Amino acid sequence: MELEVSRDSTSLSDIESHAAPSQDCMLQNHGDLSDTHICKGVDSLINVFLDRRFRVTGFLRRDNHAEVYSILCVPSPSECFEARAYDLGGLSPKLRQYRLRSIKRLSKRTVLEALWGGRTVIVYKAGTEMIQGKETSEHKEPLPSELPPRDGLPRFVENTEVKRQIKTTDRQQEMARIRQLERRQSKRRSKRQMDPSRNLREETAKGYKTEVDSPRETAEEEALYVLLYIAHSDELHLRDQLPAATRLSLERYLQKSDLNFEDDNEMEAFMKTKHHELLFLRRQQKKLPALLKRRHDEFEQILRAPPPYPVRAPPPYPSNFEHQQSVKMAQHRYKVIKNVSDILPKLIHEVDTVHRELRKRLTLARQKKQEVENLIAIGVERKRLTRQVAAYGKCSRAVFPTSMSYAQVVVQYAAAEKELNDFERRHATSSALLDSLAEYKKLIGSSGKESALSTQAPVDEFIRGFEQLDVVLRCLVDC
């Protein structure tokens, strides 16, 4: 039997006045789509009553496979329901399968399933509270962030927790600084190697040849290795080939005299310098294996290369003196790095020992300094109390006896004298101050032997003394 659809939305009493089920504008859920009533002749579900319990109040949006409507539950208006209308007729098998799968996803929340106007209507629970004042557009689907929450809870919670700032230590900062410096040096070196014109000699305005943009970073490392080799070599005559300023700095370093500090702040500055030097030497030690292999390969390549002229070439053919000198130069460069690889671990151990000793001495010196400051404060307080007693004594001699002022001064004098005696009993004598001062001066007076090599100043003087590092190495080879 086909039912007519009523669009009367005046009141609930008019809806319930229909006695016969055939005159009700409703759809009953029988659990099977084949047994449900079909209401025809209406294109929109608005103001349609389903199963006497649900009234379609308005259109919400269009999803991929259905139209979504808002539902008012007549017995319990506070509950929130929605309805989806699916058109399953005249579709391709694939699209029909998609829509049936969408219906199946709503099966756990479905409260009513019916056919209306050739479309399948699914009424399901959409939340626990009624959505008020929702305005949607028929042509634009709202974003999920624009929809009000259906469970009463905020959809997004702002994270107000303040992130804890990670504090880096001095060692980490120094390591990061060294890594950044080496990255920049490597980039500059690669850029020079890629540009062949920068490695060529060119004529200057004065008429003599000079090398354009010589790699200073490599020269500094080379100078450091050569200086370490000379400093720890048994061949003392090699030091005579150094510039005067560099030789003087090297001799002062080798004397390893004790250093005296004015206070603990100067001692702390020296300790940080030693720490930075320790990190620098460790970084250089990590480079030595690759550098040693490269020097070995260079020496082997030059050694195996055939001489440009016969060994016993008659005049006017030149001799192989230059080739022999290049072989000696490569051999000596390899020898320098080989010896430095043995020297550097000992030097690092020595610098590390000095740094640890300085750190312990600095801690003790700071403690003694605090004791000295406390004793000085005690001395200042003792002096104040002594002057106070003396002042009340003078006042008592200048006031007429038996007067009220005299009695008040006598009382104040006795109280001040008692306070001074109690203060002297509570605190140590002045000899403790002298002992603490002596210990503090002893701690900061000498920091042990200066075992680390001051690299930067001697290296700069070393490079300025010789325009090219090859000249230095040639002098060492000739010696």
Image (cartoon, rainbow, N blue to C red):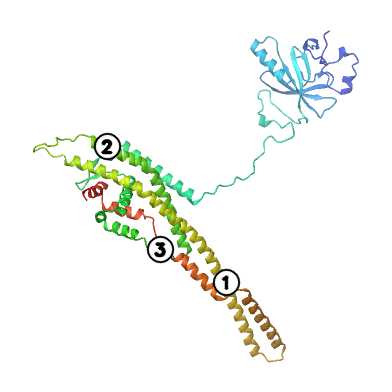
> For the residue labelled by badge 2, is the local secondary structure a helix, a strand or a loop?
helix
Taking depth in this image into account, of 322 and 96 the one nearest to the observer is: 322
Q: Which mark is residue 351?
A: none
Q: Specify which label sits upstream in the sequence, 1 or 2.
A: 2
Residue 129 location in percent, x, y? 78, 31
Q: Specify which label sits upstream in the sequence, 3 or 2.
A: 3
Residue under the point 82% across and 28% down: 77
Taking depth in this image into account, of 7 and 128 the one nearest to the observer is: 128
Q: CA distance from mark 3 to mark 2?
A: 46 Å
The residue type indicated by label 3 comes to: Leu
**Which of the two discs, 1 and 2, sits closer to the camera?**
2
The residue type indicated by label 1 comes to: Ala
Quadrant where the N terminus sits is top right
Disc 1 marks which residue?
A: 377
Q: Which mark is residue 259?
A: 3
> For the residue labelled by badge 3, is the local secondary structure a helix, a strand or a loop?
loop
Side of 92 relative to 80 (left or right): left
The residue type indicated by label 2 comes to: Glu
Q: Specify which label sits upstream in the sequence, 3 or 1.
A: 3
Residue density around tag 2, few if under 14, some if 14–19, many if 20 or more, within 10 Å = some
Residue 54 location in percent, x, y? 81, 22
Quadrant in the rendering for residue 218: top left
Q: CA distance from mark 1 to mark 2?
A: 72 Å
Kindly give the residue lying farthest to the left in the view shown. 315
Task: Relative to 398, say whether 357 is above or below.
Answer: above
Disc 2 marks which residue?
A: 300
Residue 92 can be seen, yes or no: no
Residue density around tag 1, few if under 14, some if 14–19, many if 20 or more, within 10 Å = few
Task: Relative to 104, say whether 450 is above or below.
Answer: below
